[in-house]
Image: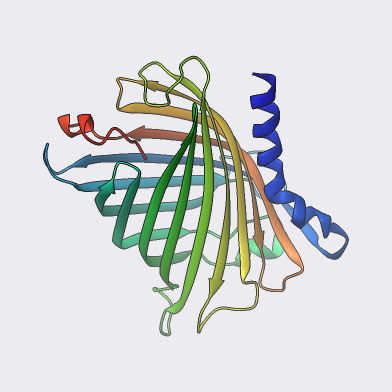
Amino acid sequence: MKKILILTFLSFFIGVAHTFAQEDDLEFLDNRIMYTKYYISDFFNDTTKWAWEADVVYRRQSQLGAGDIWDAPLRLSIRPWIAYQFTKLTRVSLNPMGIFYSAPRYPQESDLDRPFEREMRTTLQINNYVYYGRYNFTHRLRFESRWRDIDGEGRPNHNWRVRYRLRTRIPLNTDYFYTNNTWYISQYSEMHVEFGRDYGTNFFSQNRNYIGVGYRFWEWTRLELGYIVQLNTRGNNRQVDLSQGPMFYLFMDVLSRNKRRYNYSF
């Protein structure tokens, strides 16, 4: 158990190590956050490989470096997905159009006058699973087409983003992550790369690092509570929003009998 915990914490911090190595050249802006995500999915019937998914993300934030994570809104997003289960270990999902309503981050007084932004986004997502003993690894690739500031006076700003996330889940009281009444550790690190016609020069725009503890019940439902550290590079490439705080997940997946064929949650 000690080895598991040590490896998990090392992988959690390795995602931010490179950025902090350049600390003398950057200004870090403190921002406290509260992230929540609610996810539900199922197959269309008991024999098909086609599935539907939906997720809702709700986030709050502090202002001016204060500690009240419920003080101000940060983001609300709603995304419907259609998915195809190619194998037990690979799923491809498409979100034709997601709606995002986002506030700027507020670590500085000058940020308080920045406007909210409404965005429409199309996302192609690939999940692939790998097992090594009791360890459950997930490689996730996302390709996003983003139309930002769609309520602005001019045309929306458009850019592309590629995201890669490596997630590890480690059962604590069972040998298999999908066993009912399983406690587990969840950890991931994710990198965001952005580019396009209307984008600036902060191409490595974001890095997220998360660690938490989860519990599976009812076989198809699980909860997670953890802590996230997120780095967002501003357009001047000199300032970095260092956002950190608790994160809560609620997952409900594969409600139907098709779970007998595709016993993999996302």
User: Residue 164 appears at what percent x and percent y?
Assistant: 52, 56
What residue is rendered at 88% in x and 60% in y?
24
State whether residue 168 is above or below residue 27: above
The residue lying furthest to the right in this view is 24
Quadrant in the picture for residue 29:
bottom right
Q: Which quadrant, please, contains the N terminus? A: top right
User: Residue 75 appears at what percent x and percent y?
Assistant: 47, 53
Quadrant in the picture for residue 146:
bottom left
Q: Is residue 66 visible?
A: no
Q: Which quadrant, please, contains the C terminus? A: top left
Quadrant in the picture for residue 125:
bottom left
State whether residue 10 is above or below residue 240: above
What residue is rendered at 65% in x and 72% in y?
202
User: Residue 97 appears at what percent x and percent y?
Assistant: 30, 63
Q: Which of 23/63 is in front?
A: 23
State whether residue 147 is above or below residue 86: below
State whether residue 98 is above or below residue 236: above
Q: Which of 31/94 is in front?
A: 94
What residue is rendered at 12% in x and 36% in y?
46
